Image (spheres, helix red, strand yellow):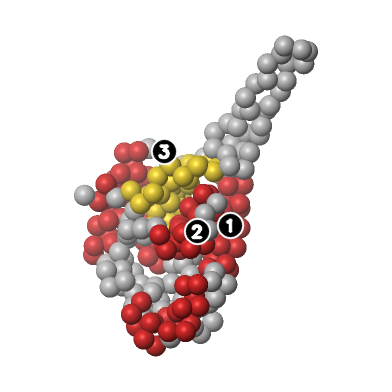
């Protein structure tokens, strides 16, 4: 991770038995979980057009709407008063969203490359319809298999899942027992939810994540995870 500007899991198990016949066993004390509050970045000019916008060349800034969304979510998180650290994707739209929150909360922003969006290769900047027309075979393969990559050397869902899981393990280790805001993108956030639920890869296509929405996952010391919130947008109304 690298700093942008100045501005874990919980404690281990403590399961014990009382010893002799008739003794009771205590429930494990897992301590405070490491909680990830997952924030999708605010809108860019490409967001309402539903164009592929990954990490393979396009790096748009927030639009006026996106900046307003960032201010609204910053106010909501300030009111919530639980965020102890902020980590963002290095892409501009996430850094701008994270900075709006960090300024309001008085925190620093760190970046982690594992949180960046998928590299969509030759599909960057195109709509789903465009890709269907220009690269139908590649699109069908991508939708059918997590190992298939977008045209032109993009990332497969399997590759994204591997680096996102590595980032998850790294950040839960660094921030044990803390509540951390992760500012990221659609695919990494959906992937963290999928992995927490133990859901199949195709579940990625069955989740909705609005711009500037909040999702929350708690990670416990025994390796279990709990999805507490998904696609919350009440702060934008």
Classify mark 1: residues with Cα within 10 Å, few (<14), some (14-19) or many (20+): some
Which residue is most to the right?
A: 20
User: In the image, residue 26 lies at what x, y percent?
Assistant: 65, 21
Q: Label 2 near label 1: C-beta < 8 Å?
A: yes
Task: Give the residue number, with chain letter if any, for mark 1.
Answer: 165
Q: Residue at x 59, y 36 (%)?
A: 10
Rounded to the nearest whole Å, what is the CA distance between mark 2 and mark 3?
24 Å
Would you identify the image quadrant in which residue 123 lies?
Answer: bottom left
Give the label, 1 or 2, closer to the camera. 2
Rounded to the nearest whole Å, what is the CA distance between mark 1 and mark 3?
24 Å
Q: Could you tell which of marks 2 and 3 lies nearer the N-terminus? A: 3
Q: Is residue 48 left or right of residue 160?
A: left
Q: Residue at x 33, y 80 (%)?
A: 129
Say which of 133 and 112 sits in front.
Answer: 133
Rounded to the nearest whole Å, what is the CA distance between mark 1 and mark 2?
8 Å
Task: Give the residue number, with chain letter if any, for mark 3.
Answer: 82
Regarding residue 176, the answer to whether it shows in the image is no
Task: Give the residue number, with chain letter if any, for mark 2.
Answer: 191
């Amino acid at each position: 991770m690298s700093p942008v500007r100045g501005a874990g899991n919980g404690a281990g198990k403590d399961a014990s038995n009382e010893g002799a016949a008739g003794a009771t066993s205590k429930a494990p004390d897992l301590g405070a979980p490491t909680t990830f509050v997952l924030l999708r970045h605010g809108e860019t000019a490409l967001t309402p057009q539903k164009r592929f916008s990954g990490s393979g060349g396009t790096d748009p800034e927030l639009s006026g709407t996106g900046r307003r969304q960032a201010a609204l979510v910053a106010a909501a998180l300030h009111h919530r008063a639980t965020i102890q650290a902020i980590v963002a994707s290095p892409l501009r739209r996430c850094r701008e969203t994270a900075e709006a929150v960090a300024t309001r909360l008085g925190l620093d922003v760190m970046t982690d490359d594992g949180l960046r969006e998928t590299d969509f290769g030759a599909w960057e900047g195109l709509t789903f319809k465009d890709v269907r027309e220009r690269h139908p075979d590649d699109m069908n393969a991508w939708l059918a298999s997590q190992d298939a990559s977008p045209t032109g050397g993009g990332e497969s869902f399997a590759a994204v899942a591997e680096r996102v899981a590595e980032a998850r393990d790294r950040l839960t280790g660094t921030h044990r027992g803390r509540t951390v805001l992760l500012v990221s993108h659609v695919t990494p956030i959906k992937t963290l939810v999928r992995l927490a639920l133990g859901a199949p890869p195709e579940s990625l296509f069955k989740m909705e994540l609005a711009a500037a929405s909040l999702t929350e996952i708690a990670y416990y010391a025994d390796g279990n995870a709990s999805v507490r919130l998904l696609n919350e947008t009440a702060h934008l109304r």
